[in-house]
Amino acid sequence: MVDPRYIRMFHAVVRAGSFAGAARELGYSQPAVSQQMRALERAVGTPLFTRAGRALRLTAAGEVLARHASSALRDLAAAQNQITAIRQLRAGHIRICAFPSASATIVPAAAARIARHHPDLRIQLIEAEPPDSVETLRRGECDVALAFSYRGAAEQLDDGDLLGVAVLDDPVVVVLPSGHRLAERRSVELADLAGERWIAGCTRCRDHFVQECRAVGFEPDIAFTTDDNLAVQGLVAAGTGIALMPGLVLSFLRHPEVISRRVRRLDDRRVSAYVLREHHRIPATALMLETFRQVGAATRP
């Protein structure tokens, strides 16, 4: 590998026709120029210059390097300009992997904030539920993963390779048909719903739901299972069962014939943004983490 500084110096020598001319152009001493050119010759393993009296001539190897020096310096300058643009968030892209309700709420709010201040930063969105979203991050297929966890499960997502930033706590509510016997209450106990038929959601949510029901003394009667939040609400509206649902979902998707009620002593789910620990200083990644944090602080599901 040849130090680019030597190439710049060599290019100046060729352009000026002498070490002294290059020294005047660059503001160096002539001995400094001579020293760097000797170092360049050692690096390439062959002489680059010969002298005929006072004239400085290029060897065959010097002529080859001279032909490539200009384009190499242009490419280096272009690369530096592009890197500067990325560092200053005037260019570049960031890939986000998020679960569906975050894709419909947190991500659009964050994208709008970024677009106001960094319109040339491009955002790509893919969807996956945790822990798949975090595995997507580990594989390098996204830059930031939005994921949720329940009590006692956060350590399954975060470890020494990841940096997690809390975004918001998303309340889990019960969704009831509008004519349900508990519709007049402002909140309910999970034990009050022991005799109900249930509609369960994604695997992670279903496992947490069953665990919570067992903790208060009953095994839930799960009549339907679907990952489709709209289908869940349709089934509830039709009277086929009731369901637990995150508040984020109901903030953008609500069937007109269902109601929601808080469940006392039922933990919220924690929504966090994760990055690979070694990447958290990349400007676009750091910006995305901070923006998600701001959006979470301003969001009340």
Image (cartoon, rainbow, N blue to C red):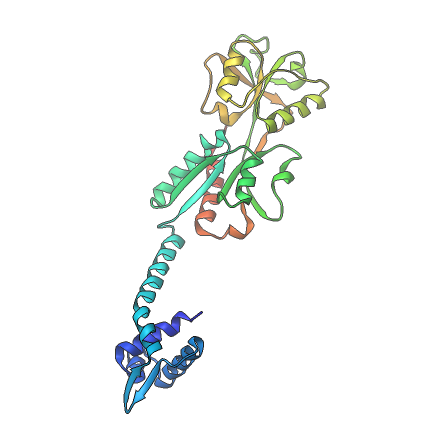
- Residue that sits furthest to the right in the current view: 217
Q: How many marks?
A: 0
Residue 238 in the image: state x and y as whole percent.
52, 9
Judge from the rendering whether residue 57 lies leftward or rightward of residue 130; answer left or right. left
Q: Nearer the viewer, residue 14 or 102?
A: 14
Residue 191 in the image: state x and y as whole percent.
68, 17
User: Residue 17 lies in what quarter of the image?
Assistant: bottom left
Rendered position, 92 above or below 103: below
| Residue visible at 36% across and 63% down in the picture | 76
Rendered position, 247 above or below 241: below
- Residue that sits furthest to the front in the current view: 60
User: Residue 11 lies in what quarter of the image?
Assistant: bottom left
User: Residue 122 lies in what quarter of the image?
Assistant: top left
Residue 222 in the image: state x and y as whole percent.
63, 16
Q: Quadrant of the N terminus?
A: bottom left
Judge from the rendering whether residue 244 lies leftward or rightward of residue 87; answer left or right. right
Residue 34 in the image: state x and y as whole percent.
37, 84
Q: Nearer the viewer, residue 77 or 247?
A: 77
Q: Is residue 105 visible?
A: no
| Residue visible at 42% across and 35% down in the picture | 109
Q: Nearer the viewer, residue 42 or 293?
A: 42
- Residue that sits furthest to the bottom in the current view: 53
Q: Is residue 99 visible?
A: yes
Q: Nearer the viewer, residue 235 or 248?
A: 235
